[in-house]
Image (cartoon, grey):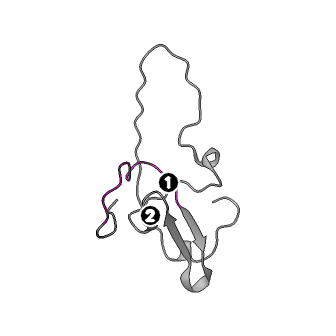
Amino acid sequence: TIPPPGRPRLEGADATHAWVRLWCGPQEGWIGFDPTNAILARDDHVTVAVGRDYADVAPVDCIILSAGEQDMEVEVDVVPETESSMAQPLAMGR
């Protein structure tokens, strides 16, 4: 994440975190606010999931009981959202 001009890059700025999107009407559409980095959420923010809280969007939901080591590999395909997909408020879920 690139900080605003004149501001230092925040530690942990690129770690997974949440931001809020607000529907500002048909002319403005969705506006994203990233309080972690104190910036507007723009094209460099990658939406991995949409939910009401962490329980709705946890990337892994399981319990592992083991004495051994575990490794996890994750792949993400990034596809830009189209203007039409952002034009109207989301219904419940997505």
| Alpha carbon distance from label 2 to label 1 | 20 Å
Numbered mark located on residue 39 in the image? none
Q: Main secondary structure of the magenta part?
A: loop
- The amino acid at mark 2 is Ala
Location of residue 55 in the rendering, given as x and y in whole percent from the top left corner: 64, 44
Near mark 1 (Cα within 10 A), the count class, few <14, some 14-19 or many ≥20, is few
Location of residue 13 in the rendering, given as x and y in whole percent from the top left corner: 38, 53
44 lies left or right of 22: left
Q: Is residue 88 magenta?
A: no
Residue 80 sits in quarter: bottom left
Magenta-highlighted residues:
7-19
Q: Is residue 16 above or below residue 87?
A: above
Q: Which residue is mark 1?
A: 48
Q: Is residue 46 above or below residue 75?
A: below
Q: Which quadrant: the N terminus?
A: bottom left
| Count of marks overlaid on the render | 2
Q: Secondary structure at mark 1?
A: loop
